[in-house]
Amino acid sequence: MIAETTAGPVRGVPDGPVTAYLGIPYARAGRFAAPRPVPAWNGVRDASSPGPAAPQPPSRLERVMGAFHVPQAEDCLSLNVWAPPGGGHPVLVFVHGGGFTSGSGGLAWYGGAELAAGLVVVTVNYRLGVLGFLRAPGVSDGNLGLHDQLSALAWVRDNIAAFGGDPGNVTVAGQSAGAQSILALLAGGRARGLFRRAILQSTPAGMAPDSPADAERNGRLLLEHLGTDPFDAPVDDLLAAQGAVARGTAAPLSPVPPFQLVAGGLVPEDLTAAPGDVEILMGTTRDEAAAFFAGDPRAAAMRPDELERTAARWFGDPGRATPGGRTADRIAADMVTDHMFREPARRLARTLTDSGNAPWLYRFDWDPGGPYGACHCIELPFVLGTEAAWRDAPMLAGTRPSRLVREVRRAWTGFVRDGDPGWPRGTTRHFS
């Protein structure tokens, strides 16, 4: 249960039939600095518990996924590996979502022990919010969290063989902001050679990267709210200033965070211009944005004309807030699902198909009968984690069919292993 990394040996712990190596540092970074290699350590490093999460406020999606309380620290660049016996296994690297503001690869929700049957599973922490995505001249150029992800993928390339993984057969998967990050790396070409396949789960591709000017405006607001040197300010003060910017700049109920990907350099303006040399499995859930709006009294109180104006502020396109017997919160959810998830996914699929790289498509339709339907994040419990880890997630309404767990994991595993999720390329599989 000892694996040798480029920085030194690590000792894992049994986790069912596999060995878990948790909290392995893959890089180090000072505040607002680029990630750099981890210094070598002496002796065998204990890898029995996840590393701290990046500093963050409570998740906006607590009401659908549930709350989590884990240690947080700026020194957060670690990853977790679940390794089955033997060697030469395909590798799945998972990048968590959370709107570039919350989440952690070390959460029990993303545990890889059950999925790691014939696969090596890796989950990653990266910097979030103002610490990961601030752009302010003299402080940060932005996209530090994306640089962290690149460093993690480079670590996998250089180290995963020691855990029984095949560095030539790596698939990277991401959900929500994690999928958006992967799309940016694909479109920008900076991850070339680091993975051969990608799984894009609920990519918010309708949320364009911020322009440098917009990002720098939010950066100036952050520094004004902070009122002190950002390099020396307490983390809690940075998070408080981040929250003040979010409250002061967002359109009502906007799902777009104030600190996210910034176009330029690492990130192209058009994320849907993905290259055609990486095999892609991609899809959405049926009711994506219900996670943000269903049952929200602020959305329910909005008139159709207000919804149209709000959509125009979010996406530059007012859409059509036609009632059709729906409540205002459901209209808002449907509009955002179309603008942010469904239509951009269709455009990306057409682009890939036209380039000769048709993706495998899916839609997650399973609905437990609760208020959120088949909402954003609903597929996650069927990919990673255990029944116990997801037991209290409100979006599941107390149920998680084992049949569907097997179906989804069979598809994901087949794609990671040999590029075959179980249905023809260019067609859509509905999970229900």
Image: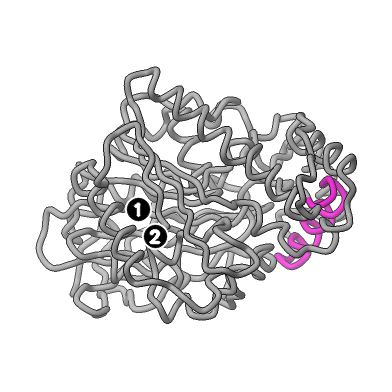
Near-viewer residue (352 or 180): 352
Residue 129 picture location, percent across and down: 66, 53
Would residue 304 appear left or right of 190 to someone viewing this image?
A: right
Neighbour class for label 2 at 10 Å: few (<14), some, many (≥20)?
many
Near-viewer residue (15 or 156): 15
Q: Which mark is residue 93?
A: 1
Residue 54 can be seen in this image: yes
Q: Is residue 108 above or below residue 176?
A: below
**Farthest residue in the front direction?**
325
Q: Quadrant of the C terminus?
A: bottom left
**Is-magenta flag for residue 91?**
no
Near-viewer residue (420 or 287): 287
Residue 193 picture location, percent across and down: 29, 34
Residue at horizontal 61%, vertical 61%? 102
Residue 417 picture location, percent across and down: 20, 49
Q: Earlier in the sequence, mark 1 or mark 2?
A: 1
> Which stretch is magenta?
234-253
Distance between the alpha carbons at the discs numbered 1 and 2: 6 Å
**Secondary-structure class at tag 2:** strand
Which amino acid type is shown beneath numbered disc 1? Val
Locate residue 397: give its quadrant.
bottom right
Locate residue 275: give its quadrant.
top left
Which amino acid type is shown beneath numbered disc 2? Thr
Contact (Cβ within 8 Å) of mark 1 with mark 2 = yes
Residue at horizontal 56%, vertical 45%? 144
Q: Which mark is residue 123?
A: 2
Main secondary structure type of the part rendered in magenta? helix
